[in-house]
Structures are given as structure tokens and as C-alpha cells.
Image (tube, rainbow, N blue to C red):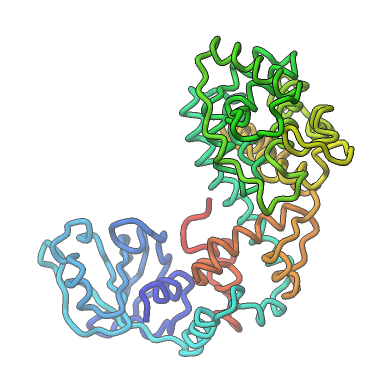
């Protein structure tokens, strides 16, 4: 048995209350189990218990066996001197703290059905281990949990954004440029796009935002795609030669160093997703919008933002997918699917993080509203949840389900999941329905 399971029982009082007695067989009443601690130190802080007429306040430590208090070195650690109760599944040894005081140790009893249900779930080979039981839960209960998961996902994304913001000296335009650009790679070319924007600061792009051709020359040049050895068929191509000529001037002016052009991947990609097309579309976006991030922050509705992403590659690419090789003429627009990817992964998280950074609750709520107005994503994870009866109406819920799958289901953190907690405790009411995570709420 894992300690985490005992933590779960203690947190939600899913044990036999009569099994809590002191050494003199006096009943112990738990007033508050304490605040769960996932860092070093006792497992629960600030617990309150009553023994007879005396109320005690302090910490609670939990082990499968009482002797583990010694095995873990707690008996010599003064951080455990304020432990008022030692809860165990097996009381196999008397233990003392670093002051030499004996710990009050209690062996709890519980319904073995809880542990059986827990094992059934965590040992299920399916990704959604509790799929068979989800239909037993009220939809409102699940939706409430998904709302928390979405906030958790946005806060997790904020950590990487804040690192970039720090690196750029709190420059929101530069930060957004870097975050947005990586999603033009559509997974396959994420790394080259990250290298590209790191080698080409946004401040340089901004100086030429009124000249789309120069922005293209900067992007294609720093991307290493103007290396004459890459596209041999383009040697006599005027547009290609003009880009090279322009980039030579700009690279000398700004001391730019291109990345390796061979880093870009073309194989197994639909031609419309070739990096050449995506770079030209990125240039159109950066050249036409001017203060792109400012316009996004000021936008009142999603349609305003979508319009900013409704761009086409330059005219040359109407009948090209790569330099120097003509193809059937088709205007290369970003498309709704690409726009949704940018919105879900870059734009809306940035709005949320910007609002949180400036303590602007209205901005954060606007980001969540925008996400509810973006269509649901379609992938194997979302389809699996749909087959279990959890259907998503918008990206708000698909993002939450991705967080649930990646951070809880695949890691079998069932005891920290509201769905898992509820199903394991079937037939019982959790002590605090509004405190369903083992950690303090975010």
C-alpha cells in the first residue's frame, strides 16, 4: 500500500472514526485534517484534533508502518517535533521525535472496498482508467473539475511564457513574437522556428514592418533558406535572387547570423504546411499588423483577433511551394484550422497571462470567454473522452481534457483527480466537496 492512499483516506475522513483512540483508549476526534503538504516536512500542516476535553493543534505525519518514521530519518529531524499525530496502516514500533518525545501513533481502519476500487483504476491499462465509472457522475461535477484543470493548464503555460518575458526584459511584443512563431512550425518545425526568432529579434522586424518584402527577406534569410545550395532550381528565380540581395544588405546592417537551412523539414508535410509557406504567412502577419500584440490585447471580440490571422503568403507563393519550382496556382491563406491553433496555444494563453501579470481579472476572464468561443480540437485524446461520454463543445473543454490526460491519467494521479477521488469513494460523501485536490487549490 502506498502512503498516497493513506493521505487520501485522511484528507477526506474515509476511515473508521472509532479506530482513532489514544494509548489510554480515549477517542480522538478530528476537527480538521490539516493542509496537505507535498514538499519536505510533515504530510499535513495545521491539523486540529480533540482528545477528551483537550484540543491539540499541530502537524500530522502518515506512514504505512510506524517504523518508517525512523527509516525516513524523521526521528532526528526537528521539523517533525510539532507532529501531534502519527497515522499508520500498521503500528509495528513505538517511535520518538528529535526531542525524545514519543509520538501518539494511531492505526486506522477503513473499508477495504476503497483500496480495491483504487487498485482497479490504477491497474487498468487503458489511458482513461476510470472510463467505466464516469457515467455514474453528474456532468456538472465533471465540468467543475475541467474548469479547474483549464486554469491549471494556463498557469503551467505561464511559467514558460514568464521565462521568455524575463529573457526579453519584460518586452511583451518580443515575448508574443517568440511564443506565436513556434506554433507556425506545427510540431514538425517547432525547433527551427524557435531558433529563427531567437536569432532575429522582433525590434528588427518592427523597423521594417511597413515593407513586407524586407520582412520576408529577414525571415527567409535568418532561417537559412536563402542558402544557394538548398534550392538549386531557384538560381535563376528573380524573386529568390531579390530576396538574397535584400538580405545581404540587411544582414550586414544588423549583423545577423542565419541558422542552418537544413534544419527545416519538408518531408511528410502537406505542401501548404511547408516552412516556406508558413514563413511568408508569418511575414504578412508581422508586416500588416504593426503592433500585433497591442491589437490583440485591445480586441473586444474574437472576430477582431481572427482577422489579424487571416493572411495569405505573398503573391509569389500562389504558384510555388518551394523556391524555383512552379505549381498549380492557389492562394496560400492561413486557414481556420491554423488560426485556431494560434488562438488556442499562443494568443489566448498570452491574454490570460498578461491579465494575471497586471492583476487584471477582466482580462483573464476575457481569455476564458474567447476559449469557449473557439471550436473543439479533434485528436485521439478528445475522441477517447468522447467515447466515454465526455463531449466537448469548445476548446475550453478540450484543453482541460488534454491537461487531465497528460498530467493525471497517464501519470496515474488518480488520488489527486476529482473524478478518481469520487469514484474510489463511491457511496460516501467527501468531507469537503470544494477541496477535491490533495494540494491546496490554485
Q: Quadrant of residue 217?
A: top right
Image vertical order of residue 442 relative to residue 170, above or below = below
259 to 121, vertically: above or below: above
Choose top left, top right, bottom left or bottom right for residue 313: top right
Q: Residue at x 74, y 18 (%)?
A: 213
Query: Considering only vertical position in the picture, is 267 above or below 7?
Result: above
Q: Is residue 369 visible?
A: no
Q: Quadrant of residue 110?
A: bottom left
Q: Position of residue 54 (x, y in %)?
A: 30, 68
In the image, residue 265 above or below residue 288: below
* The one of 148 and 392 positioned closer to us in this rendering: 392
- Count of labels in the image: 0
Residue at the image point whose x is 46% and y is 28% from the top: 167
**Residue 11's spot in the image, x, y percent?**
45, 69
Work out whether residue 172 or residue 255 is closer to the camera in this orientation and state it.
255
Residue 69 seen: yes
**Residue 225: horizontal and vertical position, in percent?**
62, 31
Residue 229, how many percent across, how many down? 59, 32
In this rendering, position of residue 410 left or right of residue 328:
left
> In the visual, does 140 lie left or right of 407?
right
Q: Residue at x 16, y 75 (%)?
A: 95
Assign the N terminus to one quadrant of the image.
bottom left
- Going 11% across and 62% down the picture, which residue do you hit? 99
Q: Is residue 54 left or right of residue 67?
A: right
Of residues 354 and 399, the one nearer the viewer is 399
The residue most toward the right is 329
Amino acid at each position: 500500500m502506498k502512503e498516497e492512499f493513506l493521505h487520501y483516506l485522511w484528507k477526506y475522513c474515509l476511515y473508521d472514526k472509532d479506530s482513532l483512540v489514544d494509548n489510554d483508549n480515549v477517542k480522538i476526534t478530528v476537527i480538521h485534517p490539516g493542509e496537505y503538504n507535498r514538499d519536505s516536512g510533515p504530510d499535513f500542516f495545521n491539523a486540529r484534533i480533540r482528545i477528551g476535553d483537550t484540543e491539540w493543534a499541530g502537524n500530522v505525519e502518515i506512514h504505512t508502518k510506524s517504523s518508517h518514521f525512523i527509516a525516513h530519518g524523521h526521528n532526528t529531524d526537528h521539523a517533525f517535533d510539532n507532529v501531534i499525530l502519527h497515522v499508520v496502516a500498521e503500528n509495528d514500533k513505538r517511535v520518538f521525535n528529535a526531542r525524545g518525545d514519543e509520538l501518539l501513533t494511531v492505526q486506522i481502519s477503513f473499508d477495504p472496498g476503497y483500496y480495491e476500487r483504487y487498485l482497479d483504476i490504477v491497474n487498468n491499462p487503458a489511458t482513461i482508467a476510470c472510463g467505466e465509472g464516469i457515467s455514474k457522475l453528474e456532468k456538472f461535477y465533471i465540468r467543475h473539475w475541467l474548469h479547474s484543470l483549464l486554469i491549471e493548464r494556463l498557469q503551467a503555460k505561464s511559467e514558460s511564457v514568464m521565462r521568455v518575458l524575463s529573457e526579453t526584459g519584460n518586452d511583451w511584443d518580443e515575448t508574443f513574437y517568440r511564443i506565436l512563431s513556434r506554433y507556425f512550425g506545427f510540431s514538425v518545425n517547432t525547433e527551427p522556428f524557435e531558433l529563427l526568432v531567437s536569432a532575429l529579434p522582433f525590434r528588427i522586424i518592427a523597423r521594417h514592418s511597413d515593407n513586407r518584402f524586407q520582412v520576408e527577406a529577414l525571415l527567409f534569410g535568418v532561417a537559412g533558406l536563402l542558402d544557394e545550395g538548398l534550392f538549386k532550381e531557384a538560381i535563376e528565380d528573380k524573386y529568390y535572387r531579390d530576396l538574397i540581395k535584400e538580405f545581404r544588405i540587411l544582414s550586414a546592417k544588423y549583423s545577423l547570423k542565419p541558422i542552418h537551412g537544413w534544419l527545416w523539414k519538408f518531408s511528410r508535410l502537406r505542401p501548404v504546411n511547408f516552412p516556406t509557406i508558413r514563413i511568408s504567412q508569418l511575414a504578412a502577419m508581422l508586416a500588416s499588423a504593426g503592433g500585433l500584440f497591442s491589437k490583440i490585447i485591445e480586441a473586444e471580440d474574437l472576430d477582431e483577433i481572427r482577422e489579424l490571422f487571416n493572411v495569405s503568403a505573398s503573391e509569389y507563393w500562389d504558384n510555388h511551394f518551394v523556391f524555383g519550382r512552379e505549381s498549380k496556382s492557389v492562394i496560400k491563406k492561413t486557414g481556420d484550422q491554423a488560426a485556431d491553433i494560434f488562438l488556442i496555444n499562443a494568443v489566448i494563453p498570452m491574454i490570460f497571462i498578461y491579465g494575471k501579470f497586471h492583476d487584471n481579472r477582466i482580462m483573464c476572464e476575457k481569455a476564458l470567454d474567447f476559449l469557449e468561443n473557439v471550436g473543439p480540437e479533434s485528436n485521439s485524446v478528445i475522441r477517447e473522452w468522447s467515447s466515454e461520454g465526455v463531449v466537448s463543445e469548445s476548446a475550453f473543454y478540450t484543453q482541460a481534457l488534454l491537461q487531465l490526460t497528460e498530467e493525471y491519467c497517464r501519470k496515474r494521479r488518480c488520488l489527486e483527480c476529482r473524478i478518481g477521488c469520487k469514484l474510489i469513494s463511491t457511496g460516501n460523501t467527501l468531507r469537503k466537496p470544494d477541496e477535491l485536490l490533495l494540494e491546496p487549490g490554485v
